[in-house]
Image: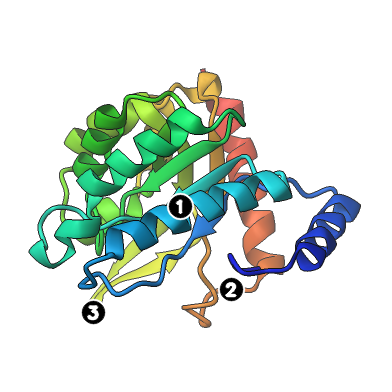
């Protein structure tokens, strides 16, 4: 499904999801634009607006996006500050209750930058998609980052990493070096009201275990943690 999908195609997808009893936690926005264009900001605004419309049409609970931070001046027109301004304006006109989730990413914006942007927007519908693996990949201080994002996390990505000679590789949750149990506890344990999403990017890493191995492991792991939560 794309932003240009026809009404018939969208309806077909919605019916297929309903038939399987699947709820859409969020739609992930992959904006494609030339950030050097003078009208890049307008293109981003139009893309955000259409994404929010599409989420409402499909029954998705939220729109999720990644935005460049402030470190790269090449993205000055479409960085977190400018997108935060656009989002604030769009949400003032939106009455659907749709949430907007901004994710931290080592190649885009750090957890601290995302937390600052969410505070700047100041709308309870805007929160953080917290990807703790990207703290390690981006060299962020995990305790400082967790303290900054904690009040606004609406999605937690259960992703684990293991050190290798070449860097890191993705491993099943609970088998690597990311302290997911500590993170969930810091978010409130059983009182945490957001989603926990299993992040398993086999599309980009075909060497990862298949879904019939990975998904049962994730379900079992989360149930084990739930049993230990306060």
Q: Relative to the observer, which residue lies in front, 98 or 25? A: 98
Where residue 196 appears, as percent x and y from the top left, is 54, 41
Judge whether 154 appears above or below 159 on screen.
above
Is 213 drawn above or below residue 220 in the view shown? below
The residue labelled by disc 3 is 166
**Quadrant where the N terminus is found in the figure:** bottom right
Residue at far right of view: 19
Which residue lies under the disc numbered 1? 48
State yes or no: discs 1 and 2 in contact (Cβ < 8 Å): no
| Image x and y of residue 151, in percent | 34, 24
Mark 1 secondary-structure assignment = helix
Under circle 2, the secondary element is loop
Closer to the eye: label 1 or 3: 1
Quadrant of the rendered image containing residue 106: bottom left
Q: Position of residue 55 (x, y in %)?
A: 63, 48
Work out how far the residue at label 2 is from the one at label 3, CA to CA, in angstroms.
Answer: 20 Å
Q: Which residue is mark 2?
A: 209
Is the residue marked by circle 1 packed among few (<14), some (14-19), or many (20+) residues within 10 Å? many
């Amino acid at each position: 499904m794309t932003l240009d999908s026809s009404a018939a195609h969208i309806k077909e997808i919605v019916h297929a999801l309903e038939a399987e009893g699947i709820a859409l936690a969020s739609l992930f926005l992959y904006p494609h634009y030339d950030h050097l264009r003078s009208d890049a900001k307008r293109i981003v605004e139009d893309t955000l607006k259409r994404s929010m419309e599409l989420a409402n049409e499909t029954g998705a609970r939220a729109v999720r996006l990644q935005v460049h931070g402030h470190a790269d001046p090449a993205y000055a027109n479409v960085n977190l500050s400018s997108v935060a301004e656009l989002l604030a304006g769009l949400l003032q006109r939106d009455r659907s209750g749709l949430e907007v989730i901004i994710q931290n990413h080592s190649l885009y914006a750090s957890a601290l930058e995302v937390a600052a942007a969410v505070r700047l927007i100041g709308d309870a519908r805007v929160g953080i998609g917290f990807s703790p693996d990207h703290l390690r990949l981006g060299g962020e201080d995990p305790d400082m980052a967790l303290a900054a994002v904690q009040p606004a996390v609406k999605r937690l990505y259960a992703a684990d990493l293991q050190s290798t000679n070449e860097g890191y590789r993705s491993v099943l949750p609970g088998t690597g070096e990311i302290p997911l149990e500590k993170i969930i506890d810091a978010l409130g344990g059983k009182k945490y009201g957001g989603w926990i999403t299993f992040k398993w990017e086999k599309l980009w890493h075909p060497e990862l275990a298949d879904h019939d191995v990975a998904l049962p492991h994730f379900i079992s792991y989360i149930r084990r943690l739930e049993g230990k939560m306060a």
